[in-house]
Image (spheres, rainbow, N blue to C red):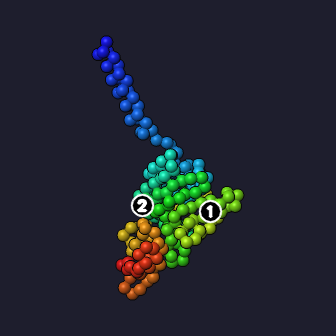
Amino acid sequence: MGLLYHNHHHRLASVMCFLIAAIPLVQSEDSIYDHLRQFGLPAGLLPKGITDFTIDPSDGRFQVNLPQPCNAKFENQVHYDFNVTGTLSPGQIGELSGVSAQELFLWFPVKGIHVDVPSSGLIYFDVGVVDKQFSLSLFESPPDCAAVDPNDPEFSCRPEKEGGLQLESQTESGKICCNGGQENGLRAAS
């Protein structure tokens, strides 16, 4: 009897282990754009064609992986790095990294995005010192995104991971990037 009980218990444990191991393999068929919409955000906050992403439904943390950095044009240029991460919550993305927005010659890291009362038709990009206001209609559908070569000297003038802003200026010897972030210094980009 003890042997029969042991074999039955062993089979039951094996079946349970198989079922538990199979659960993470089940993936949602929702796209990252579907997840944005579920949180009351427009799908056009991220570029067209994203298929490689992860999202933790328990806390809204997500990561989008792009094949290469790219720029999209709204009212201003928006730059997307190889990886874009953040936390989704109703009407906003917090702890955002991997996105920057250009205003004249300045590149500002976008730290968060939130939709005002949806009926207002406004969306705000948090660039640290100020919120940049845009029309929500600009972000209705995912934009085309022009690939950027990470070895391109202009690419090297984008904000660093730590944040900050950069001003680029042409000189005879090359491009000078003024980093207004944590380093508060100048660096040359050749």
- Crowd tier of the residue under label 2, counting other residues whose Cα lies within 10 Å: few below 14, some 14–19, many 20 or above: some
Q: Give the labeled residue for mark 2.
A: 82
- Crowd tier of the residue under label 1, counting other residues whose Cα lies within 10 Å: few below 14, some 14–19, many 20 or above: many
Distance from disc 2 to disc 1, alpha carbons, whole Å, reads: 24 Å
In the image, taking residue 136 as reference, residue 58 lies left or right, namely left
Whole-percent x and y of residue 45? 55, 59
- Quadrant containing the N terminus in the rendered view: top left
Q: Which residue appears at 46% of the width and 63% of the height?
A: 98
In the image, taking residue 2 as reference, residue 124 lies left or right, namely right
Specify the farthest residue to the bottom: 172
Specify the farthest residue to the left: 3
62 is higher (above) or lower (below) than 109: above
Whether residue 137 is visible here, answered yes or no, is no
Name the amino acid, label 2: Phe
The residue lying toward the viewer, choosing from 57 and 157, is 57
Q: Which residue appears at 51% of the width and 78% of the height?
A: 105
Quarter residue 181 falls in: bottom left
Q: Which residue appears at 60% of the width and 64% of the height?
A: 124
The residue lying toward the viewer, choosing from 114 and 155, is 114
Q: Secondary structure at mark 2?
A: strand
Q: Give the labeled residue for mark 1.
A: 123
Specify the farthest residue to the top: 1
27 is higher (above) or lower (below) than 105: above
Front of the two marks 2 and 1: 1
Name the amino acid, label 1: Ile
Whole-percent x and y of residue 14? 35, 27
